[in-house]
Amino acid sequence: MWASILLVLVILYIVKGVIIVQQMEEVIIERLGSYKTTLKPGLNFIIPIIDTPRGINWKVSQKGIDGQTYSYTKVMTKIDKRETVYDFPRQNVITKDNVTISINALLYFQIVDSKSAVYEITNLIDAIEKLTQTNLRNLVGQLDLDETLISRDKINHELRQILDEATNKWGVKVNRVELQDINPPADIQAAMEKQMKAEREKRAIILESEGQKQSAILKAQGEKEAAINKAEGEKQASILRADGIAKARVLEAEGEKQAIELIINAIGEKGKPDQYLIAMKYLETLKGISAGQNNKVVYMPYEATGILSSVDGIKQMFDATK
């Protein structure tokens, strides 16, 4: 009989007195209602009945048969010190310009002091949830709708700082806050979509006009540069053409000069070279006048006798030279 009682006591001690704590978990032990110790990961021994684990209220989410997610509170004797993510229920918040929006937030927190988490607050998760909702209303109430939609990072940062400071005495470290969805009412959302569409169309028209403007400017610049290049080309061509004509005239004059010098040298001063040159120029002029194909009139100029006398003088000059 005593052996049976001893066996029962041993089994009771093993069941109630031996506690295995996993990594990143802790257990708060009370002795006769007072805090005794905090069990660390590993194999731990307590005195049954006298020493009892103190539980912590923890909200657990579970999906039901209908597919909806339901939350309920459960007493956990082992405190999980890993980082925990909590999805807050969607709540309605009023902005500064009196627009009611629906916000869903995520909170990442971690218990760093198990004793404070158990004894400093009755229901830790509910306290964090209510604190988050209250401060979120305050922050969003200071912003207009447009500011709220573009200030997620600012709201996340400020809300994290407020929650981290407030939950510090509860032994909790708030690591991150994220606003998942910010949904305005259906009529406001429809108006915003129309406004965004109008803005996109406006930007498209502006971009198209800018493109046409730049195209016209580039076309005008191209035509201007083309006209300048053409004028420069014509200018250079005119200069080169005039230069060529001038050089040709100089060369022609040089040739004529040399020819006259040869004639003068050949005829001599006594042979009257000036009369010779005048007569030759006169003959060249007559040749040009009668050179046309349709010119059927042959006439003798009024000074023909003078020319003939010049020709006779040329003959005399050559005879004298011989």
Image (tube, rainbow, N blue to C red):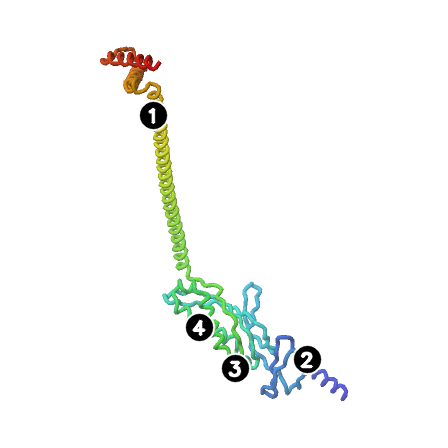
Residue 144 in the image: x percent, y percent? 38, 65
Residue 198 is left or right of residue 55, and the answer is: left
Mark 3 and mark 2 in contact? Answer it, CB < 8 Å. Answer: no
Q: Residue under circle 4?
A: 135
Residue 251 in which image quadrant: top left
* 30 in relation to 99, above or below: below
Given the image, on which type of amino acid does mark 3 rest?
A: Glu
Mark 3–mark 2 distance (CA, rounded to whole Å): 27 Å
Q: Residue at x 56, y 82 (%)?
A: 115
Q: Earlier in the sequence, mark 1 or mark 4?
A: 4
Label 3: element kind: loop
Tell me if I can see residue 64 in this picture. Answer: yes
Given the image, on which type of amino acid does mark 4 rest?
A: Asn
**Mark number, residue 43:** 2
Q: Residue under circle 3?
A: 120
Given the image, on which type of amino acid does mark 2 rest?
A: Leu
Tell me if I can see residue 292 in this picture. Answer: no
**Mark number, residue 85:** none
**Towards the viewer: 178 or 75:** 178
Given the image, on which type of amino acid does mark 1 rest?
A: Lys
Q: Earlier in the sequence, mark 3 or mark 2?
A: 2
Residue 87 is left or right of residue 188, and the answer is: right
Q: Residues within 10 Å of mark 2 (few under 14, many from 20)?
A: few
Q: Residue under circle 1?
A: 257
Mark 1–mark 4 distance (CA, rounded to whole Å): 112 Å
* 128 in relation to 185, above or below: below
Quarter of the image with the C terminus is top left
